[in-house]
Amino acid sequence: MSEGKIESSKDGAVGWLVFNNPQRLNAVSYEMWRSLPEEIAGFVGDPDIRVVVLRGEGDKAFISGADISQFEKARSSEARIADYDAATRLANEAILVCPKPTIAMIQGYCIGGGLGVALCCDLRFAAANARFAIPAARLGLGYAYGGIKRLVDVVGPSFAKEIFYTARQFTADEALAMGLINRIFSTADLLAAVNDMSARIGQNAPLTISAAKLAIELAEGEWDGKDSSAVDNAVAKCFASEDYKEGRRAFSEKRSPNFKGA
């Protein structure tokens, strides 16, 4: 059985990361967790990339969770458990700290660790066939504080408790109602909708978006020190940029701006 892989590609200003393990509904193997930070870093370092989209291979699953078939071996001792947990933590952190906007394009199952990955993204767009769950209570697994906090930040404590306590699957409509996802589209329309949103974001000023992302993360309490100096510096960088000049010129000339991210 294939251990799966993460595939990356570029389409204009959009970087695509595909979780490719369809034999296991795109379950994430240890090797996939390990490779994710490097793939994200490649897009972060590419000035042509303005948006990063994460999706699963096919339309049956975004990510069905961590590959539990590996647990007996990969989590068979304290040392191996610590190593596996570090791999998943670093993978999620790579998405969280990505300075460029991230979008989860969700079709089918978005379960357990898959929902954790989606929660690390800035935006979540789902097909009508999407299903969401964290079945930890059916497996005896414990969830670290960071993952639960991200869920609480998105849906609030009451819905977070319902998701964890019941371990049941939620429909896309239920996920939208609790604020777990941004929007729902038909399976046929999801890709076009994600492409449209990516294009809209990609046309806007990258420095402005980066500064806004920092400020929103600070407001969410992602930074322990509550130090706003990084936000202040990012805002100052916007006003000192050529993009700010271009934005003013484009507004005066009644045309679309051509931002360079500098």
Image (tube, rainbow, N blue to C red):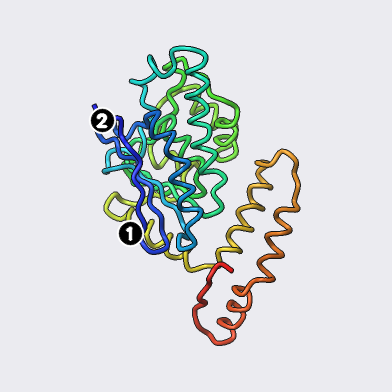
- Is 140 positioned to the left or the right of 28 in the image? right
Can you give x and y, in whole percent of width and height, for residue 42 in the image? 46, 50
Q: Which residue is at a point 43% across and 29% down the rendered structure image?
A: 112
For residue 254, above or below residue 26? below
Residue 252 position in % (x across, y down): 59, 86
Q: Quadrant of the C terminus?
A: bottom right
Splitting the image into 4 quarters, where does residue 176 fall? top left
Residue type beneath disc 2: Ser
Marker disc for residue 172: none
Q: Which residue is more in the foreground, 174 or 125? A: 125
Measured as percent of width and height from the top left, residue 146 is found at: 59, 31
Q: Would residue 210 be found to the left or right of residue 41 on screen?
A: right
Determine the CA span between mark 1 and mark 2. 30 Å
Please determine whether, in this image, residue 129 is positioned above or below residue 194.
above
Point out residue 222 in the picture as x, y percentages from the top left corner: 65, 41
Is label 1 or label 2 in front? 2
- The residue that label 1 is drawn on is 192
Three-letter amino acid code at the position of disc 1: Ala
Query: Vertical placement of 207 versus 220: above or below?
Result: below
Residue drawn 56% across the image and 40% down it: 154
Task: Residue at 45% x, 27% y: name it.
Answer: 134
SS at circle 1: helix
Q: Which mark is residue 2?
A: 2
